[in-house]
Image (spheres, rainbow, N blue to C red):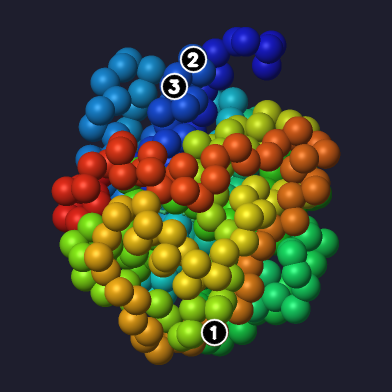
Amino acid sequence: MLPGAMATCLITGGAGFLGSHLCDELLRRGNRVLCVDNLETGSLANIEHIRVPEFVHYNVDITDPYHVEEPVDFVYHLASPASPIDYLRLPLHTLKVGSYGTHHTLGLAKLKRARFLLASTSEVYGDPEVHPQPESYWGNVNPIGPRGVYDEAKRYAEALTMAYHRQQGVDTAIVRIFNTFGPRMRPNDGRAIPTFLRQALQDRPLTVFGDGSQTRSFCFVEDEIRGLIGLAESGHHLPVNIGNPEEYTLLELAQTVIEVTSSRSEIVHEALPVDDPQVRQPDITLARQILSWEPTVGLREGLQRTIEAAGPEALIGSLR
Ligand code: NAD
């Protein structure tokens, strides 16, 4: 591709939380966008504001073979249930999207001679014994626990991506996405930030799992999307962490949400989910080196921008 030329980007999972922001940003940068999404966990509401001829939505289940007629330059493969509520409800579907869905999408990228980016996850590190987690760490995943369907689907998808690259010559990239937040997260998807926001905005108790000493790192969606595009447009093939290295305990997160929303909520504690990782923090040395990427939006600002962009009603009810 010549720099500045309009590219055609196919996004699987384009009607989801991250996918819809990626559609917006790639269109804003002057590209054509083909969104492939069967709306399993995404929503038309995430893309209904996009009304330009450069955007097309195909309602296709990628676990079946699929094809698009026109040339494609970039394939962003994001389709997969992503929140624990979804993959625990859809265990076989999650494994099929990671396996068949990734096969079909890599096959399409091969046919089109497109650059392929796999959306992998920090969950490939499992409950890590190394902290923070560099890409060279192989992980500590329980394959047979309830979360195994997601973690192992992603690990398989990474192996498949490297095999298509090494054996079939497909130009591939792998991004390991760490917890990301922002407008269009669903208020009831079970993840910490939308749950705490929903509870705080209603002055209801914030439910922290365990004693709340487990840590997470939260990346604002705008930073995450910039990282994904930067990696897709680089020539790098091995996995790259994209996430915000600022680390918070869940208790600190709950307190920050209460402050930002000026809520009167108190904090209560609930049982820890099975195999809940104790720590989670990306080592982003590689992204800094090869992409000159680093996050620019901190937790407080990101929370404020999420509330402003979505509106309190949407964060309590049907979040957009
Ligand atoms: P999401 O559930 O909002 O989006 C996933 C999209 O994939 C949905 O629109 C869904 O309808 C679509 N999809 C699912 N199965 C499909 C199928 N068989 N055919 C076609 N479309 C299908 O989730 P998200 O948070 O936007 O996550 C997007 C990607 O990023 C996922 O691959 C996820 O594993 C990865 N990721 C996200 C995070 C995060 O913090 N949001 C963290 C790590 C990794």
Q: Look at label 2 and name its amino acid.
A: Gly
Residue 164 percent location from the top left of the image: 71, 49
Q: Position of residue 59 (x, y in %)?
A: 30, 42
> Is 237 on the left or on the right of 50, as rendered?
right
Q: Which residue is mark 2?
A: 30
Residue 120 falls left or right of residue 40 = right
Asked if residue 136 is positioned above or below residue 49 in the image, the reply reads: below
Query: Residue sitting at 35 percent across and 61 percent down?
Result: 258
Q: Which amino acid, mark 1?
A: Asp
Q: What amino acid is at disc 3?
A: Leu
Q: Are marks 3 and 2 in contact (CB under 8 Å)?
A: yes
State the quadrant of the N terminus.
Answer: top right
| Of pointers 1 and 3, the one earlier in the residue sequence | 3
Q: Quadrant of residue 171 in the image?
A: top right
Tag 1, which secondary structure? loop
Label 2 C-beta lies within 8 Å of the nearest ligand 1 atom:
no
Badge 1 vs badge 3, beta-carbon distance below 8 Å: no
Residue identified by numbered label 3: 27
- For the point 21% across and 48% down, the residue is 312
Quarter of the figure with residue 156: bottom right
Residue 259 in sight here: yes
Q: Which residue is mark 1?
A: 275
Q: Say which of 222 and 6 sits in front.
A: 222
